[in-house]
Image (cartoon, helix red, strand yellow):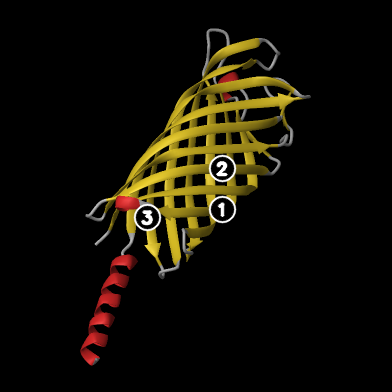
Amino acid sequence: MKLKLLLLLILFAKSYLVYANPEASIEIATRSLQYHEQLDDKIFVNEKGKAHQATIQYRKFLSPSWHLNVQSQITYGTLDYEGQTLLGTPLITETDYRLGNIALQIQYAHSTQFFTVFPYLKISPHYWSRKVLPTEHTAAVRISRRWWEMDAGIILHKPLINHWSIQFETYWGISAGEKVMFDYTSSGFAKKSADSNQGNFWGAGICVAKQFQSPWRLTTGYRLHHAHWGKSDTVIFDHPTMLSLFEPRNRLKNAEIFIGLSTRIQ
């Protein structure tokens, strides 16, 4: 009896240690983006195109139920721009798009008979830059935004046969500390920033994973993200000429297809 109990304790400790090993992963994705600015119910700036994305993540298992994720992500690409100049002249060019963030996420695992539920909370600082490229008659303009994002989400994970699994995720979030920076230095103006209205975010996705006999796991899937902000405060430029600027209501929609690889760290 004592020998059986000892063997059970050894097996439990061994399985817990395997479970408790941290995990590292890398993911690449292609994003389809659409951004527009709207004023008086009229869209006067529209950008769309493809972007590339890379994500690295470290997951620490604090206990069998509590997990801590640290994630870093960068997105970059060139979008087609259709809008207008400050004087209202139609403008067609391209936009250099850059988005980076670092996220800290805490999640809880609750297993049921059919699937495992992972409710989570996430906080992440973001930096987003849009550089409208110069043309023969216009100078470059860079509009960037910084904010803190707080998300609440849930993941449903369902094991399948032959070490396959599928999961669904959705989240909703809001922003804080939003700042919009206007860089018109190529036209002789100084850089200035303005406070922005709160941002709202929503996303959903599906992921299919294959766990190999080794510590490696392959993932692939599809995600949707939506973000929108209200009109920002107005900034006044007085040199080389008087100019007032604000960022109008805007909306960003994107869809991504991703593939990733993760492994337990022994």
Closer to viewer: mark 1 or mark 3:
1
Precedes in sequence: disc 2 or disc 3: 3
Q: Nearer the viewer, residue 92 or 64?
A: 64
What amino acid type should be assigned to the residue bearing mark 1? Gly
Alpha-carbon span between mark 1 and mark 3: 19 Å
Precedes in sequence: disc 1 or disc 2: 1
Q: Residues within 10 Å of mark 2 (few under 14, many from 20)?
A: some
Residues tagged 1 and 2 counted as in contact (Cβ below 8 A): yes
The residue where tag 3 is placed is: 58
Q: Residue at x 49, y 61 (%)?
A: 107
The residue where tag 2 is placed is: 203
What amino acid type should be assigned to the residue bearing mark 3? Tyr
Alpha-carbon span between mark 2 and mark 3: 21 Å
Q: Residue at x 46, y 34 (%)?
A: 256
Q: Residues within 10 Å of mark 1 (few under 14, many from 20)?
A: some
Do we see residue 197 in this rendering? yes
Check disc 1 and report its element: helix, strand or loop.
Answer: strand
The disc at residue 153 is 1
Residue 134 coordinates in the image, percent (x, y): 52, 15
Q: Is residue 207 above or below residue 117?
A: above
What amino acid type should be assigned to the residue bearing mark 2? Gly
Q: Residue furthest top?
A: 136
Residue 178 coordinates in the image, percent (x, y): 64, 44
Residue 186 coordinates in the image, percent (x, y): 56, 21
Check disc 2 and report its element: helix, strand or loop.
Answer: strand
Residues tagged 2 and 3 counted as in contact (Cβ below 8 A): no
Q: Residues within 10 Å of mark 3 (few under 14, many from 20)?
A: some
Alpha-carbon span between mark 1 and mark 2: 9 Å
Q: Residue furthest bottom?
A: 2
